[in-house]
Amino acid sequence: MLKPEDLGEGEKERWRALRVASTAPRNPFMEPEFTDAVARVRPRTRVAVVYEGREPVGFLPHERGRLGQGHALAYGVSDSQGAVLGPGLGLNAADVLRACSLSSFAFDNLEAEQELFVPHASAEYASYVIDVEKGYGTYESVLRAQSPKFLKTTLAKERRLGRQVGDLRFVFDERDPAALRTLMAWKSAQYRRTGRRDRFAQDWITRLVEQLASRTRGPDCSGTLSVLYAGGQPVAAHFGLRSTTVLACWFPAYDPEYAKYSPGLVLHLRMAEAAAAEGIGLLDLGRGAAEYKDSLRTGELPVYEGAWTRPGAGAALHWLSREPARRAHHFVRNRPRLAAAAAQALKGVGRLRRS
């Protein structure tokens, strides 16, 4: 059991090699660089290392809470979670987590290849993806076939934005800290406007994003800020993580003043074009239904939510703190009328916050 800063470079290289050998998409949330960044703002971050003889063959990044409660790294924020294991180890979750002295282990975006923990999942969700493996031109052809009106309308709005607001400029990897602060301000306002919890009101999330943007530049985990400018001013932006093959879409937002031009949709099209040009084959839009995802996506990947627990006070504390809310949320999401009513209620909360 190690703190991430105590991992040697040889162990990190082994971690990366196991990810290369995996059949799962190489999501940057699963790389050691992301664990390092989380550890700088979450001091309870640990990595369990599994050895065969003197050879490291597995890694489980996680966070440890009271009474041995454990949860996936950056639980509630990370879009891909789980262990990084060599094939055919024959491990089971109970043995691994007992060795970690954990009474429970919760996850909410477990990737599909996680045989160790998938049997303990209580719900499966779709993470929507954009496939640009064959190039952006092929992706546009797919959109023309499945959403012809959407693509035509969005491209027309893009041209209108350029004519009426000013020349358009897109930067795939913007390094200006002011642009990141603008994005976080937009996103906080969006959370409040829609009645949702403002993630950037949590200091550790703000610091994590700032660190990833300024310090994390590995080939398979790099903080990436993309910005769409019109007339020299930012009108939409996104911050996420990229590897050599996957762009994990994380925090998109736009200036509501330009909403009639759908700058967020234009931004995503330009991100897909730039990612394809960089050799990235997949944009992962993350879990959760949204109208813009339905318009942009070409497919989906399963992710899982749930927890492993063992009898005791820690497991009881986990159940009381998470399960009632999780079950209520799942109940509502699976009933469209209730989900629509809940969305309207959240918007009402947002209006009260602004008044």
Image: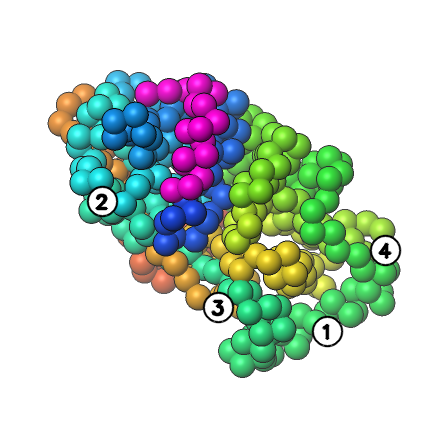
Figure check: 41 above or below 18: above
Kindly report the secondary structure that dominates the magenta region of the rendered protein: helix
Figure check: 211 above or below 6: below
Residue 16 forms part of the magenta stretch: yes
- Tell me how far mark 3 sits from mark 1, CA to CA: 21 Å
Dot 2 surroundings within 10 Å: few (below 14), some, or many (20 or more)? few
Dot 3 surroundings within 10 Å: few (below 14), some, or many (20 or more)? some
Mark sitting earlier along the chain (3/4): 4
Mark sitting earlier along the chain (4/1): 1
Can you identify the residue that label 1 sits on? 156
Please name the residue shown 17% across and 32% down the image. Answer: 94
- Tell me how far mark 1 sits from mark 2, CA to CA: 52 Å
Can you identify the residue that label 3 sits on? 298
Q: Quadrant of residue 156?
A: bottom right
Q: Is residue 349 in view?
A: no
Q: Nearer the viewer, mark 2 or mark 4?
A: 2
Please name the residue shown 86% across and 60% down the image. Answer: 166
Task: Name the one closer to the observer, 294 or 58.
Answer: 58
Q: Amino acid at mark 3?
A: Thr
Q: Amino acid at mark 4?
A: Gly
Can you identify the residue that label 2 sits on? 88
Mark sitting earlier along the chain (2/3): 2
Range of magenta residues = 1-18
Q: Is residue 311 in view?
A: yes
Can you identify the residue that label 4 sits on? 231
Task: Name the one closer to the observer, 160 or 32.
Answer: 32
Q: Indicate how the structure is coloured in the image.
A: rainbow
Mark sitting earlier along the chain (3/1): 1
Mark sitting earlier along the chain (2/4): 2
Asked if disc 4 and disc 1 are in contact, CB closer than 8 Å, the reply is no
